[in-house]
Image (cartoon, helix red, strand yellow):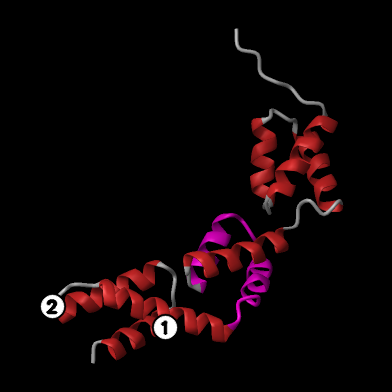
Amino acid sequence: MDTVKTYTVEEAKRKLEAFCAYQERYHKEVIDKLQKMRMIPIAIDEIVVHLIQNNFLNEERFAKSFARGKFRYKKWGRIRIVRELKQRGLSTYIIQSALKDIDNEEYIATFEILAEKKQAEIKEKNTYKAKRKLADYLLYRGWESDLVYDKVNELYE
């Protein structure tokens, strides 16, 4: 018979401290982990409060780190970042705070480089189809449609 590991509240606190110290987490992710560990609701609340009070868990810090990382490394636009953070149940206030960390000049420069690099990769001869491919690519990555269409038209003049 399979025995399921049970944890005391103290063991669970230590385990979740390590979990949160490894990388930034958001509340729902921590709660899901505690539920998988079969912790009861009152213990979950106690552990989450402990993690917040001891600065292991901070959603604003998570959101800022997430936004910076997805922008810098995955070249996501603000729309995609907002969508992903909303899916994780973060508040509009926290999301807006995270977006403020993205420098506007760097944002536009990244967009320009990304668009030009992708255009160079598109081998489509039909201009309409090439424009569509570029626009779809940039929109999927969460860049604002006005930026995308202006740039597509500029690149295919």
From this viewpoint, which residue is outermost toward the top? 1
Which image quadrant for residue 102? bottom right
Q: Which residue is mark 2?
A: 126
Above or below 151: residue 24: above
Q: Nearer the viewer, residue 37 or 114?
A: 114
Residue type at mark 1: give it.
Glu
| Image location (x, y in percent) of residue 11 | 81, 30
Above or below 98: residue 131: below
Which image quadrant for residue 2? top right
| Image location (x, y in percent) of residue 29 | 64, 46
At horizontal 69% and vertical 50% (from top left) the residue drawn is: 27
Which numbered circle lies on residue 97?
none
Which image quadrant for residue 129? bottom left
Horizontal side, residue 41 vs residue 33: left or right: right
Where does the magenta region start and end? 78-103
Which numbered circle lies on residue 112?
1
At horizontal 41% and vertical 84% (from top left) the residue drawn is: 147
Q: Nearer the viewer, residue 44 or 71?
A: 71
At horizontal 82% and vertical 26% (from top left) the residue drawn is: 8
Q: Is residue 87 magenta?
A: yes
Q: Secondary structure at mark 1?
A: helix
**Disc with the residue nearer the chain's start (2 vs 1):** 1
Foreground tag (2 vs 1): 1
| Image location (x, y in percent) of residue 120 | 28, 77
Above or below 88: residue 112: below
| Image location (x, y in percent) of residue 75 | 47, 69
